[in-house]
Image: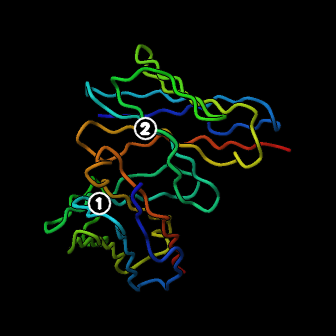
């Protein structure tokens, strides 16, 4: 069975601070995909990143960066110089190869205070 | 990217009535779509997998007679909540496997917030 754990339920930071959202996963698949989604109050899911299990390179996209550590089964997400518009619930998710069903973590609610 | 459109975005219905939610892939064909449910302040839970031309596969604990799924075409899946009750109030969101060039991704609709009064 697959499992995604986001231990941080809620985080509050002051604008311009850096913040890291943790994600730990469990799977027996050797090939799998990891995702991060942003869910603003309106409810839609905004796709942020997809990483396959064979690619352990870290990725940076603007103020966002992701650290994939296969050895610790973690896929952490860092927002640098946070902004109020970053306030949302962030979900980490996992799918097996060939499966497009996603197993979601419980989400981390990020509040960026001006 | 590929676009998935979900309609309606919000619906309020009376207890005992049925509500239909549509999920459309706008610019690609989707042989497989997924329906998720999200209770307030909780995570998204997979309800069922919808396959074009065949019966949906429901997750354990999801009542298939209550949540009717129809995937009659390659671009449309519908979820009908039958005899809705207040406890069915939730956020429902669909996703579709992307087109060939993006086949490793699933694209999400905008979601439907259902309130049963």
Q: Is residue B113 left or right of residue B62?
A: right
Secondary structure at badge 2 equals strand
In x, y percent, where is residue A68?
A: 47, 23
Q: Do discs 1 and 2 share a chain?
A: no
Residue sticking out furthest to the left: B54
Give the residue at x 45% y 69%: B88
Q: Is residue B58 left or right of residue B37?
A: left
Chain bearing mark 1 = B
Chain bearing mark 2 = A
The foreground one among A73 and B86 is A73
Q: Quadrant of residue B72?
A: bottom left
In this figure, which residue is indicated by the disc labeled 1?
B33
Q: From the viewer's perspective, is residue B69 above or below residue A113?
A: below
**Can you say which quadrant of the picture contains the N terminus of chain A?**
top left
In x, y percent, where is residue A2?
A: 33, 34
In this figure, which residue is indicated by the disc labeled 2?
A50
Q: Quadrant of residue A7?
A: top right
The foreground one among A90 and B16 is A90
Give the residue at x 81% y 34%: A16
Secondary structure at badge 1 equals strand
Q: Quadrant of residue A32?
A: top left
Give the residue at x 64% y 35%: A62
Residue sticking out furthest to the front: B101
Total count of labels: 2
Q: Residues within 10 Å of mark 1 (few under 14, many from 20)?
A: many
């Amino acid at each position: 069975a697959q499992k995604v754990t986001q231990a941080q339920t809620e985080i509050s930071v002051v604008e311009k601070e850096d913040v890291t959202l943790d994600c730990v996963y469990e799977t027996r698949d050797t090939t799998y995909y990891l995702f991060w989604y942003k869910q603003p109050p309106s409810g839609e899911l905004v796709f942020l990143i997809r990483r396959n299990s064979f690619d352990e390179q870290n990725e940076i996209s603007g103020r966002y960066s992701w650290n994939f550590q296969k050895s610790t089964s973690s896929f952490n997400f860092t927002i640098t110089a946070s902004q109020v518009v970053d306030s949302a619930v962030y979900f980490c998710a996992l799918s097996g190869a060939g499966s497009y069903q996603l197993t979601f973590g419980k989400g981390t609610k990020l509040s960026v205070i001006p | 990217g590929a676009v998935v459109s979900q309609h309606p975005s919000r619906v309020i219905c009376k207890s005992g009535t049925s509500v239909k939610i549509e999920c459309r892939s706008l610019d690609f064909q989707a042989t497989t779509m997924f329906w998720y449910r999200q209770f307030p302040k909780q995570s998204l839970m997979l309800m069922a997998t919808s396959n074009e031309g065949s019966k949906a596969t429901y997750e354990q604990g999801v009542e298939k007679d209550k949540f009717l799924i129809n995937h009659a075409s390659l671009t449309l899946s519908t979820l009908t909540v039958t005899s809705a009750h207040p406890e069915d109030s939730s956020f429902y969101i669909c996703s579709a496997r992307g087109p060939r060039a993006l086949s490793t991704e699933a694209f999400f609709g905008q979601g439907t917030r259902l309130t049963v009064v």
